Amino acid sequence: DAKTTQPPSMDCAEGRAANLPCNHSTISGNEYVYWYRQIHSQGPQYIIHGLKNNETNEMASLIITEDRKSSTLILPHATLRDTAVYYCIVRSGFNDYKLSFGAGTTVTVRA
Amino acid sequence: DTGVSQNPRHKITKRGQNVTFRCDPISEHNRLYWYRQTLGQGPEFLTYFQNEAQLEKSRLLSDRFSAERPKGSFSTLEIQRTEQGDSAMYLCASSSLAGNYNEQFFGPGTRLTVL
């Protein structure tokens, strides 16, 4: 019962912005959008999360559409170290302790 | 290093043997999670502890699997009578009840190969 849809892969040029889309058309009002990434041979790493407002931190920006049915993770200046699988996850916040990962988007940053 | 640690990092065993993995969470994190990840797939939730109480087990966790967190600190995951289908990366994560987003911090995983 996948709650999110992501493209399987995308390439990005080093130094350019990487825009990763995610569809979550069945999201409910109390569900947050989370992004994690997994670099090869490592455990997943939290990137950012949001409910309905756009969010920005030192790693990325998260843009959520007004109807909340889709979002975009933006890596402003991609580096080779950003090559990873990126997972978009919908969960209901504090009391929804499980992370339900899909297959994610494999992002390859090329020099 | 104050992150989540897992031991061993790699385990090769023969079918039918028992194996045990250990996870040491970030100190003071009272929530601990186990996930399993097979090649090309995202991690799948297995079980979750709050302090020493195991609050949920996925149906993926057959009766050959058992997890414990005896003093609310480290946790162990045991697989009895291993099968080739158990070959996977076993990931542990921890989180704190403090904060408003319940970020999970993952360890590097234990890669199990069942021959």
Image (tube, coloured by chain):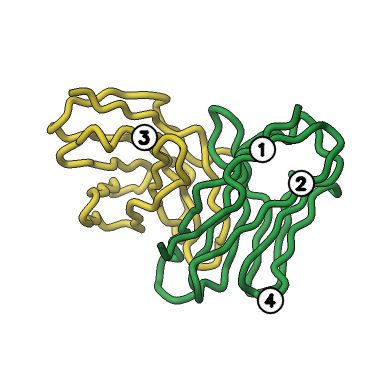
Chain colours: A yellow, B green
Q: Residue B112 carries which label?
A: 1
Q: Nearer the viewer, residue B99 or A30?
A: B99
Amino acid residing under circle 3: Ala
Dot 4 alpha-carbon crowd within 10 angstroms: few under 14, some 14 to 19, many 20 or more: few
Q: Position of residue A56 (x, y in %)?
A: 21, 55
Q: Are marks 3 and 4 in contact (CB under 8 Å)?
A: no
| SS class, disc 1 | strand
Q: In this figure, which residue is indicated by the disc labeled 4?
A: B71
Instruction: State the CA–CA distance, disc 1 to disc 4.
Output: 26 Å
**Contact (CB < 8 A) between labels 1 and 3?**
no
Q: Residue B85: where, in percent of width, then height?
A: 75, 30
User: Residue at image x 26%, y 58%?
Assistant: A53
Question: Are circles 1 and 2 on residues that touch, CB within 8 Å?
Answer: yes
Which residue sits at x=35%, y=41%? A70
Report the mark closest to the observer, 3 or 2.
2
Report the Cα–Cα distance between label 4 and label 2.
21 Å
* Pointer 2 chain: B
Query: Is the N terminus of chain A in the top left, top right, bottom left or bottom right quadrant?
Result: top right
Say which residue label 3 marks. A84
Secondary structure found at label 4:
loop
Are the residues flagged by discs 3 and 2 in contact, CB closer than 8 Å? Answer: no
| Alpha carbon distance from label 3 to label 4 | 35 Å
Q: Tell me the chain of label 3.
A: A
Q: Are marks 4 and 2 on the same chain?
A: yes
